[in-house]
Amino acid sequence: MIYLDNAATSFPKPPSVIRAVSDCLRLSCGNPGRGSHALSRAAAETVFSCRERAATLFDLSDPSRVVFTAGATASINTVLKGILRPGDHVLISDLEHNSVFRPLSRLAASGQISFDLFPTRFPPCQNADSAILSSLEGLIRPNTRLIFCTHASNIAPIRLPIRSIGAFCRKRGILFGVDAAQSGGHYPISMKQDRIDYLCLPAHKGLRGIPGAGLLLFGERPDLPLPETLTEGGSGYASFDPGMPSELPERFEAGTLPVPAIAGLSAGLEWVLQNGQEAIASAIEERVRRLGELLSGIPRLRIFLPEAEGLILLFSIDGIPSEAAAGELDRRGFCVRGGFHCAPLAHRALGTPEGGAVRVSPSELLTDAEAEAFAKGVRETVRLLRGD
Amino acid sequence: MTEYNEYSIFALIGSMTQAMRAERALACAGLRSEVVKATPSEYRRGCAYGILFSSAEERIAAEILRNARVRFRFFRRGGSG
């Protein structure tokens, strides 16, 4: 089997991550912040170390601004539903995942807020980053409270200029949230320099952890509004108070934390810090480039944004639904994802066909021989399904 | 469990995370402490955490915690000495 679906979840996990999860389950899986015995203290140490590593990777001074959630989707929901007030207006990009689009659509359908999409695709003669900022300038309203966007698309090699957007927001007093589900662990993100107020990430993609945990990082400016809580419950602190504590991170961590997943995330963060994000991204980009070269000559196959550098290759085959192509490739031992990747906005923006497109997202471990075998498999799949 | 020769200072902090921040801040300055739970007489709103350290380091610890922006309140606890 050749795994090419790292945009869904990274695989295989680094041995240090597997070891950390296993060691946690065997040796230190107490309930952190709920007791004072050795196992609880060991779990608390695991959890706090993970906060410190996340703060280091994403350039936060205070690890208590690192909140654990159930995943990036939970982080995004916490921000959108907890921050927005009746009458607020929001701008999101036209590449957003349903984890952003659906919560906002629900809030908008109930009449609480309104939102608009800002375009990210422009003719090649235009500087895309400047064009995005011009679009934002034209779309903001007096009641625009939040701009929320993905850092890197989950379907194509597109990255948004978050540093410029962050500066744009800060200058205008607009809150700025970033979905870094695809970029976290690959491309550098600085909460401070990118002026990010809310950063949302999963543990199990570029940060190399396992599913079950996510991160919500809060920026450090003193006037930053914190969301209302979506979940209340035990926090191991101030038990007689009827409300959640006001302090971060416990305010947003009701209930028992997924300590094994956090142990894995901590090891994954350490792996990323040791290997270097730029080196990791560069190695994956090189493999995507090689896959692009190998697939580019195949008749009736269209690669979207073939010239762009990124972690993902997206293609479609004329007249063939993407799921049929992905299914045939699966039978040949290749794990890729067809369909719409929970990102209908992005598919619309890119103009993919009615049958969706096939997403190929290798890891840095893909060998040249594996890339060639995949290209051969795609060539044969096209021939088989097209009947040419 | 750390044993202190003299009586100790308990710094009531609040949550486990803030208590660990406090412990790390002291450790960075070479001061040994440990995270422990507050007693009901030290904190009346339910569970809370803080750090325990030698009373000989009371003044320097207070300075370190203030610099680290950790909110605290000191209590004296009887030690083995």
Image: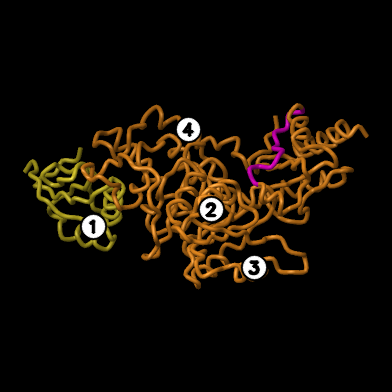
Is-magenta flag for residue A340?
yes
Colour chain A appears in: orange
- Packing grade of label 1 (10 A; few <14, some 14-19, many >=20) is some
Numbered badge on residue B71: 1
Q: Do labels 3 and 4 share a chain?
A: yes
* Residue A347 shown left or right of residue A41 in the figure: right
**Residue A287 seen in the figure:** yes
Q: In this view, does A52 lie above or below A386?
A: below
Quadrant showing the C terminus of chain A: top right
Numbered badge on residue A19: 4
Q: Are marks 4 and 1 on the same chain?
A: no
**C-alpha separation, residue under disc 4 versus residue under disc 1:** 36 Å
Q: Which chain carries label 2?
A: A
Q: Do labels 1 and 2 share a chain?
A: no
Foreground label between 4 and 1: 1
Q: Residue at x 23, y 53 (%)?
A: B31
Numbered badge on residue A108: 2
